[in-house]
Amino acid sequence: MSDNQAFLDHINQGYTTKGDFITMGAAMHEGETITNAHVKIPLKTLNRHGLIAGATGTGKTKTLQVIAENLSEKGIPVLLMDIKGDLSGIAAASPGHPKIDERHEKIGIPFEAKEFPVEILSLSEQDGVRLRATVSEFGPVLLSRILDVTETQAGILSIIFKYCDDNKLPLLDLKDLKKVLQFSTAEGKKELEKDYGRISSASTGSILRKIVELEQQGADIFFGEKSFEVDDLCRVDENGRGVINIIRLTDIQDRPKLFSTFMLSLLAEIYGTFPEQGDSDRPELVIFLDEAHLIFKQASNALMDQIESIVKLIRSKGVGLYFVTQNPTDVPDGVLGQLGLKVQHALRAFTAKDRKAIKLTAENYPESEYYDTKEMLTSLGIGEALVSALDEKGRPTPLAATMLRAPMSRMDVLTDTELKALLKKSRLSSKYNEDVDRESAYELLSKKIEKAEAEEAKAAAKKEREKLNRSSSSSRSKSRRTSATEKAVIKVLTSATFIRGALGVLNKLLK
């Protein structure tokens, strides 16, 4: 038996599946693509999360595109983070190319150009279906971790949320939260102290500064209504294909706080909303987090704990998370250990740090009698990758240096005209793109403060009137007493007795 035949048997045996699957491409041996040595990923294990890594320009985005297309074909909805702005072409069919045909001939899969159902979403003011969430939906625990506050300050946030719940004050946006925090140490200080205990103005001041920092990264646009319903991510089109939801994030690359805030709220909402799936045959939703290091950048320990917990738990809801980044070391070990599918494109060994990263990366893959993993990591070409997955029983599949299939859709962005036409066809725009600013904590507390101030002014005016009345009454009383005295004196002076007495004294003096 030739080496190539033995290798083909090795791959086919390791990647045999009983259930449905997607095909990544064909395995390579000694630099040659082995036709029909197909690397297949069972749908059953796609909720076990994954990683797509590699240096810039090695084909990570195209790999993401291939997986998303094939999932859509199987009726599985997808959510993509488009930070570089190069994924909108999924909505248009590939124009094809002789090199694509040549690649697919080597793989043993016919190439078919297709367009896919796409929904464009937006986290900022860019065109697309607006994604929003209310402060109440975050809750005090998640918000505390996003703001990276102290334990004492987290307790104050819990009190604020409880006070708002008890008094029916909706916390919709950051304006509401700031108003309640200011109210708690000013006009409402006595009210809150009576029922919830003393709240330090120094602590609320610190929380307010954290909120302002979040606002400066654009979170004031994200917090509010109408809140996005995560069930709308799980739609299929009239042909039974899963909708590929693309979030345009090209304008928030320098705002990692906003990105991590959104991602955590989305994952928390999905975990809290989706029913338990158990060990199902296919995922309900697959999420790709491009430039994944932005999620972990500047993240506090508390935030990292939250991310790791969600990654561990959310797969039971039938949701797969796929991190796309340049180097596996960008992803924390606690998260990396949870990833089933790993697609590793080439790495570059330009520095000692790079060589160390390559050595660590090689240790994350199963040993293979056919490859020197460390050497292979630096010799892979564009559109080639080391693939390791899980079979249907959860066991690692053989390591395969894979010639990846080409995307069926366009490997370029839509034109402005095409994008406008796509946005016009959106079924969600009318539902989420209307600005809603209903009466919430800010307005209700403002009215409460105005009413209290009006009552206080009314009480002060009444007190002033009473003071004036008392002063006037005292003056009248004094005047009456003076008048009575004068009358008495006049009466005495004009009496006959007084006159006779006075005349008698005068007569004596004249004599």
Image: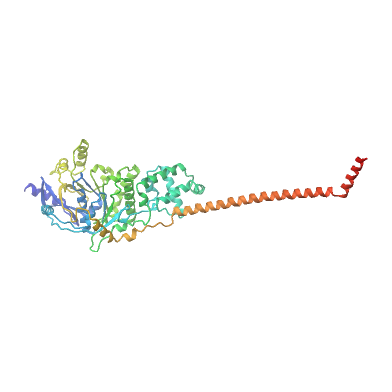
Q: Quadrant of residue 245?
A: bottom left
Left or right: where does residue 131 sit relative to residue 362?
right
Along the viewing direction, whichever of 214 and 73 lies nearer the viewer: 214
Residue sitting at the far left: 1
Against 478, residue 433 (above or below) is: below
Across the whole image, how many numbered discs are drawn on residues? 0
| Model colouring | rainbow
How far from the left and from the top, in percent, is residue 209?
40, 44
Residue 190 pos. (x, y %): 52, 47
Q: Along the horizontal axis of the image, is 14 left or right of 433?
A: left
**In the image shown, does 369 or 460 lie closer to the viewer?**
460
Residue 92 in the image: x percent, y percent?
A: 21, 58
**Is residue 270 something that shows in the picture?**
yes
- Residue furthest toward the top? 352
Q: Given the current orientation, which residue lies at the most extreme front position?
A: 510
Could you tell me which quadrant the C terminus lies in?
top right
Q: Position of residue 489 (x, y in %)?
A: 81, 47
Residue drawn at point x = 6 percent, y = 48 percent: 2
Judging depth in this view, the residue of 158 and 429 nearest the camera is 429
Relative depth, front residue between 182 and 366 = 182
Most extreme residue toward the bottom is 238
Q: Is residue 76 visible?
A: no
